[in-house]
Image: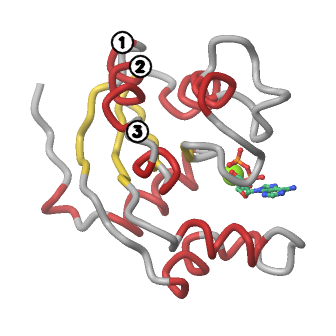
Amino acid sequence: MEQTLAILKPDCVRRGLIGEVIRRIEAAGFRIRAMKMVHLTKKEAEGFYAVHRGRPFFEELTTFMSSGPCVPMVLEKENAVADFRALIGATDPAEAAEGTIRREFAESKGQNIVHGSDSVENARIEIHFFFPSIELVDRR
Ligand code: DAT
Ligand code: MG
């Protein structure tokens, strides 16, 4: 079964939307295989988003991602990576499809509620960034 890494970003936590977003994730058929709350340091946020280093939004992104606690989780489902990207919608909420999580809740392209891995390979790397194997459950 495929896995992806989701993060409920600091805006999601701050605005009291954790429950609502998890409800949508579960209703869409994803099983939660790991979950916790962490407050990333600036350095840790820069490490997670290292692929975007040098982009004009890198400073804003890593400051935002270290601005408060976030909730990383491992989600499992057939076709989890692509299906989760479809559930959250485009990066910019103004371009995200009707009914997607970002369209419904995100306030801007920078503060867009939720992260989802963009490939199976990146999902594996991102899952291990947040979760040692002892924290990954395998229950049906
Ligand atoms: P996604 O999160 O949809 O995979 P991405 O990987 O291109 O998008 O960028 C990572 C995050 O960086 C994104 O969720 C929000 C922020 N970001 C991207 N482009 C931005 C921009 N033009 N202005 C501000 N923030 C941006
Ligand atoms: Mg991305």
Local crowd size for mark 3, using a 10 Å CA cut-off: few (<14), some (14–19), many (≥20): many
Provide residue 37's location: percent of width, then percent of height.
Answer: 28, 59
Element class at badge 1: helix
**Other-residue count near label 2 (Cα within 10 Å), few / some / many at <14 / 14–19 / ≥20:** some
**Residue at the extreme bottom:** 43
Circle number at residue 27: 1
Identify the image quadrant of residue 22.
Answer: top left
| Disc 3: which residue | 3
Residue 5 visible in the displayed image? no
- At horizontal 52% and vertical 51% (from top left) the residue drawn is 11
**Secondary structure state at the residue bearing disc 3:** strand
Q: Name the residue tied to disc 2.
A: 24
- How far apart marks 2 and 1 lie (CA) works out to 5 Å
Q: Are marks 2 and 1 in contact (CB under 8 Å)?
A: yes
- Residue 36 image offset from top left, x and y in percent: 24, 55
> Is the N terminus in the top left, top right, bottom left or bottom right quadrant?
top left
User: Relative to residue 54, is residue 72 depicted above or below?
Assistant: above
The mark lying in front, picked from 2 and 3, is: 2
Q: Residue flagged by tag 1: what amino acid is it?
A: Ala
